[in-house]
Image (cartoon, rainbow, N blue to C red):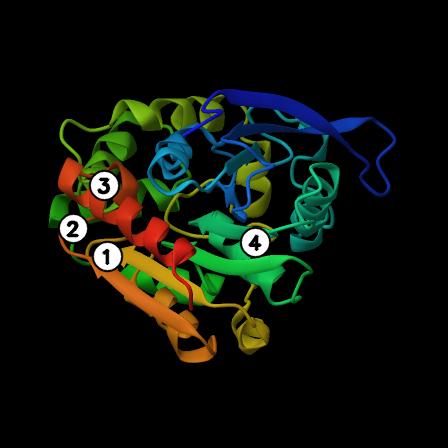
Amino acid sequence: MADTGKKEGTVPLQIQHLDAPCHTYYKIIGDLSSKSPRLVILHGGPGTGHEYLLPFGCLWEQFGIPVVFYDQIGCAASTHLPETTGDESFWQESLFIAELNNLLDALQLRDGPGYHILGHSWGGRIAAAFAATQPQGLKRLVLASGIASTRSWVEGMDTIRKQLPLDAQSTIDEEEKNGNFDSPRFRDAMNVFFCNYFCRAEPFPPRELLPAFKNMSEDKTVRNSIAGPSPLNCTGSFRDWTCIPRLHQINVPTLVYNGEFDTSHDITTTPFFENIPRVRWITFPDAGHMCHLERPEIREKVFRLVGGFLTQDN
């Protein structure tokens, strides 16, 4: 495959009611001038940055799909906005939709063969909401361990919490009630949760996840403003968010997938399957929230599934 080099850069981003200049960082694997629709990938978190999704770059070599990664506003290599911490009117869906539209225009991705969108976890929220606007040039949609609504996600997380060992449950409940999210007891109990439901790869965490943890620990503005301090609940600006009433407006073929032990539980995945007109749902056995970072055989199935879906004729 020609042109396998990585290209990176930034695009200016003008945010309403914000005077300071901002930018969105992007990285491209592959050749955007090829005849294949480009795949734009939206990371999770919120606030993780794109690095943990870089394994999807193999889709260029294996399927000839150019892949565009980017860091959403407020994290990693894009502009950080710590002065907006807790500003719920600022951290809204419309901000991320505007940023995505700005990137598509700057890279001229609507032209020619168009583009696909893959949203992972939190990125699945924005991807679904964006696709529901029936944007120009969008060909296919992948919702990878996505979230259809905050309420359904919380219901799924509550179900998962009840499956943890009793000592981990009680520790999490106690420390969460007291707001001790940085205590060693809370971290130890959450490690049980992470190893069983977030990513089941051994050893944990896989190296690809380390930049995400670093990004989120160094600047908690986005995470705390949108979701709040607890990794198991949502008390921030997205606490009442839902895309379910809009899902029927998605007019492109859609692939939905999650893991058997995913933090994006079937409870929050089912609305995608029930409401998107042309949709396929796959669950990967013995996988957690990071299907693409699990055991090698699961990883390979993920990339084969996504690549095949994006290149099939109908």
On the picture, is 77 further left or further right than 182? right
Quadrant of the rendered image containing residue 222: top right
In front here: 281 or 201? 281
Q: Which label is found at residue 126?
A: 4
Residue at screen point 84% across, 43% down: 16
Task: Tell whether label 1 touches label 3 (CB within 8 Å).
Answer: no
Image disc number at residue 160: 1
The disc, 2 or 3, on the residue closer to the chain's N-terminal end is 2
Which mark is in front, 2 or 3?
A: 3
Label 1: state its secondary structure. helix
From this view, report whether residue 200 is shown above or below residue 29. below
Residue mark closest to the camera, 3 vs 4: 3
Q: What kind of element bears circle 3?
A: helix
- The amino acid beneath tag 3 is Arg
- Horizontal and vertical percent for residue 109? 66, 45
The residue shown at (56%, 71%) is 250
In this view of the protein, can residue 288 be seen by the observer? no
| Three-letter residue code for mark 1 | Ile
